[in-house]
Image: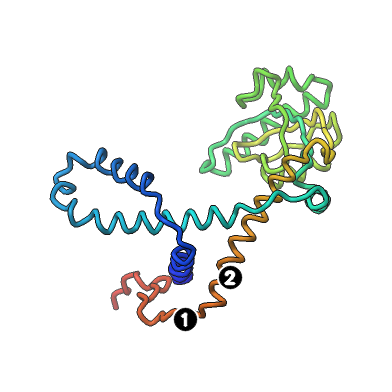
Amino acid sequence: MGDDLVNRVLLLREAQRRGIQPDAAEIKKTLDGYEQRYGNSEHWKKNKATILPGLTAKLEEDSIVAQLEKTTRAVPDPDADAVKRYYETNLEKFTEPERLRVSVILAPVAPNAMQEDWDKAAESVSNVLKLIRDGADFAETAKTHSKAPSAAQGGDMGYLHKGMLPEAVNDLLGTMKVGDVSEVVRLLEGVGLLKLTERIEPKKHPLERVEQRARDLLKRDNGNAAWKSLIADLRKASPVQIDESRFLPMVAEGAGEAAAPK
C-alpha cells in the first residue's frame, strides 16, 4: 500500500511536469453522475459543498495520471521480426489445447454424505461397469443408469480440455485410449464411469493465421513494460523511504481470540 501511495505522488508530479491537464468534460460528466445518483439524498444536499472540492481534486488527479498512463502505454507497433520472435517464444499462446470428448455415467452423492452413501454409490456403479464389460453399450446404459445432466445424450459431455476437470480426472484421462472405459472413479458430484470417445491433439496455428493477435499481444506487453519502466525510473530519480512507524500494526493470527478462562 505504501508503494502505491509513493507511485501515485511521483506519477502526479511527472504528469504535472509534462503539462498534462485534467479532462474537464469527463470530470463534469462524472460529477453530474453523482448529482443524478445522490441528488435527492439529504446527506448529499447537506454535505455537497464540503464533499465537492475534495472529490473534484481527486478526479482531476485521477484524470492526469490516467492520461500519463495512456500516453506511456501507446508504444509503436512492433515490426515483423519482433512479432515473429514473440510468436516463436510464446507458442503456447497460439496453440489450441488438446481436447477430449468424454462421456460419463454418474451416481450422485452429496459432498457431505456419510461414507456409507459413497460405498453404496460405488457398488451401484460397479454393477453398471460389469454390464458394460459384458457388452452393454455405454451410451444406452448411460441413458438408463446415469443421473448426470448428460444422461439423455448417452452421457456425452462434449469436448473438454485440461482445466475443466479435476486434476486427478485429467490424469486418468491422460492414460486412457479412445474407446476405453475407466474403472469406478470418485468425482466431485459422486461416483461414476468415464469413457473417452475422442481425443483431438493440440493444434499449433501458423504465424500467418495469428500474426495480428501476436502483434497485439506483443504491443500490450511492450506497453506494460513501458509503464513499469516509467515508474521504476521515477522511483530511482526520487528515492523515497516510507515511514512505517505510523502504520497501524497488523493483528497477529489468533490475537483476536478471547483468552480461555482459568
- Residue sitting nearer the eye, 35 or 122: 35
Residue 177, how many percent across, how many down?
86, 35
* The quarter of the displayed image where residue 157 is located: top right
- Residue sitting nearer the eye, 66 or 76: 76
Pointer 2 or 1: first along the chain? 2
Specify the farthest residue to the front. Answer: 19
* The quarter of the displayed image where residue 191 is located: top right
Quarter of the picture holding the N terminus: bottom left
Quarter of the picture holding the C terminus: bottom left
- Residue sitting nearer the eye, 180 or 11: 11
Residue at which label 2 appears: 232
Q: How far apart are marks 2 and 1 (CA)?
A: 15 Å
Q: In this view, does 43 lie to the left or right of 179?
A: left
The answer to whether residue 174 is above or below residue 146 is below
Q: In this view, does 67 lie to the left or right of 180?
A: left
Residue name at image x 80 percent, y 35 percent: 209
Residue name at image x 84 percent, y 21 percent: 135
Amino acid type at circle 2 is Ala
Residue name at image x 79 percent, y 31 percent: 196
Q: Nearer the viewer, mark 2 or mark 1?
A: 2
Q: Is residue 203 visible?
A: no
Q: What element carries label 2?
A: helix
Q: Which mark is residue 131?
A: none
Mark 2 Cα within 10 Å, few/some/many (few <14, many 20+)? few
Residue at which label 1 appears: 241
The answer to whether residue 161 is above or below residue 246 is above
Coloring scheme of the render?
Answer: rainbow
Residue 139, how many percent across, how many down?
74, 20
